[in-house]
Amino acid sequence: MRMFDRIDAATLEDRDWQLWMLAMVSIFILTAGMALLMYPTVFATSEGPGGVILRRSFVGFCILCFLLEVYLLDRQLVIRRLRKQLAEEQQLKVRIVQQASTDLLGSLPGFSHFQDRLAMEFRRAANTQQPLSLLLVVLRLVREVAGPEAAAAAQGDVAKALIRKLRGEDSIFLFQPGVFAVVLPGVRGPDGQRVADRLREGLIDVAGVSSRFTAEIQVVNYPEHATTAREMEQIAAHCFSKDKAVASAA
């Protein structure tokens, strides 16, 4: 039985159709054989009420068997059409989600915008003696997530998860595929670490049970880790340049 249980998922639809055909052919053979066995007895009966009833019953039996075959064939065709329609709708949904993820990633500002925003926020923090934190999020896709569509979908999910966790004054940037930066004005080092832990938990949920990716989050704080905007920018640029593998995988 194990030999017959080895079914490839790619041929599951064909196996289902073959099973239906086997059932319908088996029913046809059984009903045809029964009709052939009944035929001599029914038509050898002498004329009379009993013979008429037998012949009518025989004809009714044949008609019912034919209608059963037609009904089973019609149901199978309906099921195949609905399955095909469902598969097309699922593919359309996947394409819509992938397109939405691509559009979201395309709408995120890049590294040059990050430089301008970091310089502005740093000047504000320095003038008001307020802290400034920077989160660098590096996404690494697993090998099972192959193809640009799946990679874009995973990165789009990450971007949406990050945006949902941010405040109104926070800013998110996309350096390259798989590398994000988040500017957190007025956030101290310990608070930035707590934000990073919260984001990390959210990204674990986004990765799903299949663990489509892993994420590393680095916290850079002024004035604890850097004393100038240039130093913070250099740390971010280092993160931007060291993960080319993520870009190639995406």
Image: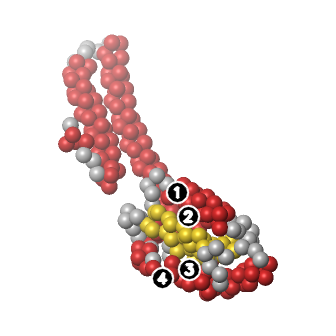
> Which numbered tag is attached to residue 204?
1
Could you classify mark 4 by the number of other residues whose Cα lies within 10 Å: few (under 14), some (14-19), or many (20 or more)? few
> Which numbered tag is attached to residue 241?
4
Residue type, label 2: Asp
Identity of the residue drawn at 39% across and 67% down: 146
Q: Position of residue 175 (x, y in %)?
A: 55, 80
* Eye-nearest disc, 2 or 3: 3
* Eye-nearest disc, 1 or 3: 3
| Lower sequence index among marks 2 and 1 | 2
Query: Is 82 situated above or below 212?
Result: above
Identity of the residue drawn at 65% across and 84% down: 228
Distance, label 1 to label 4, CA atoms, is 25 Å
Secondary structure found at label 4 = helix
Residue farthest right in this picture = 128
Identity of the residue drawn at 38% across and 30% down: 64
User: What residue would you read off at disc 2?
Assistant: 157
Distance, label 4 to label 2, CA atoms, is 23 Å
> Which numbered tag is attached to residue 95?
none
Q: How is the image coloured?
A: secondary structure
Q: Nearer the viewer, residue 180 or 61?
A: 180
Residue type, label 3: Ala
| Lower sequence index among marks 1 and 3 | 1
> Which numbered tag is attached to residue 236?
3
Q: Are marks 2 and 3 in contact (CB under 8 Å)?
A: no
Query: Residue 102 sits in which quadrant?
Result: bottom right
